[in-house]
Image (cartoon, helix red, strand yellow):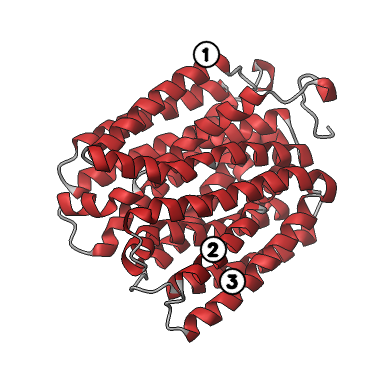
Amino acid sequence: MTGQDKPGGAAEQVRVEFIVLLALTISLVALSIDSMLPALSEIAADLGVADPNDRQMVITVLFAGFGVAQVFYGPVSDSVGRKPAIYAGFLIFLAGSILAILSQDFSTMLVGRFLQGFGAAGPRTVVVAMVRDRYEGRTMARIMSLVMSVFILVPVLAPSVGQGILMMAHWRAIFWMLLILGAVTSVWFGLRQEETLPIERRRELSFARILRAVIETFSNRVALGYMTATGLVFGAFIGYLASAQQIFQEMYGMGKLFSLCFGALAVTFGAASLTNARLVMRFGMRTLSHRALIGHTVLSIVFAVVALYVDGKPPFLLFMAYMMGAFFLIGLLFGNFNAMAMAPLGHIAGVGAAVIGAMTTFISVGSGAVIGHAYQGTILPLSIGFAVLGVLSLAVTKWADRGHVEAAE
């Protein structure tokens, strides 16, 4: 295949609704994270959280459920079809939302958040397989970038939505919003999105087949290298998400302006996804993403040195300038790295997407939790984390490129 839309060939145009619907379907993850950020301190106070850094678990536990679940959704979607697997994810997400609404202690809240992450993993994982069912190569990278461009509106708006809800209601109302939106999106998806995996291409759900696919994924140098690099880069991003509320509202004293600052950085990320969608067809995934990763790593090392020089408390505008630059460069990586990892796995797209998604999440949650929990009133853990993970990502991609194949162009 050359990367065109498989069912109808080059003449079939990408439907706008397909991109928007897939973006909204995977947005449950971002919305469940970002709308909650302004409420972390109130949740911690109401549910009796003693250690201020423990509030970050409301974010990281969701990612843990998200990572564990991806291992299951991919193989199931290969066997029963993409849509049933996504329906199951929506149902679990709604159950987790209800549990969070009813929670009276922090442990129950964390169980609800784990279920939200476990459920949201269904749409997020299987959507990648759905795109891979229809596209490949540079075209897949372009489609994923367009999906991410629409998806990025969620983190731009979500903190403001969460802040607005807090101004009028209790923090539990945010979970009511997630519950309603999840239900509405699932109905829209069910009515408007067609199945992308025909019956004749489905595979038997067997442990032996899944094990063979998992072994093949880990044995492929390109897939292993790029999913590891994605996890490392995203680890710095999760470290930022976990500590963003403390950095903006406590360290820099932004108060209710936190949502605006967070949204500004999200806009930068979205602009990068749009830019990538335009440039990837011209320059190719490897060239574009490698230059972006080098730029991101060098920028992060320089800023880490500056942060050390000023004892971890750089001027706010300097911090924002660095983060906008770093986010723009990271935004050029995600769609490309994911597409390159998936490139050699088209024949096992469901399991491949599951393994890549799960491993990416495990790596990123582990490294991101370390960065977030190391917060001690300065941005030193964050800035050093960005630099170190950038260097490691460069090393891994160099190793992966030794197994480079034509499909990863």
Of badges 2 and 1, the one in the foreground is 2
CB atoms of marks 2 and 3 within 8 Å = no
Across and down, in percent, residue 42 comes to 22, 51
Q: Is residue 123 left or right of residue 175?
A: right
Which badge, 1 or 3, is on the more N-terminal residue? 1
Residue at which label 2 appears: 323
Which badge, 2 or 1, is on the more N-terminal residue? 1
Across and down, in percent, residue 353 comes to 60, 40
Whether 381 is drawn above or below 12: the answer is below
Residue at which label 1 appears: 191
Of badges 1 and 3, the one in the foreground is 3
Q: Disc 2 residue type?
A: Met
Q: CA distance from mark 2 to mark 3?
A: 9 Å
Q: Residue at x 46, y 76 (%)?
A: 314
Please identify the quarter of the rendering in which residue 126 is found: top right
Q: Secondary structure at mark 2?
A: helix
Across and down, in percent, residue 82 comes to 57, 25
Which sits in the foreground, 359 or 58? Answer: 58
Q: Secondary structure at mark 3?
A: helix
Please identify the quarter of the rendering in which residue 93 is found: top left
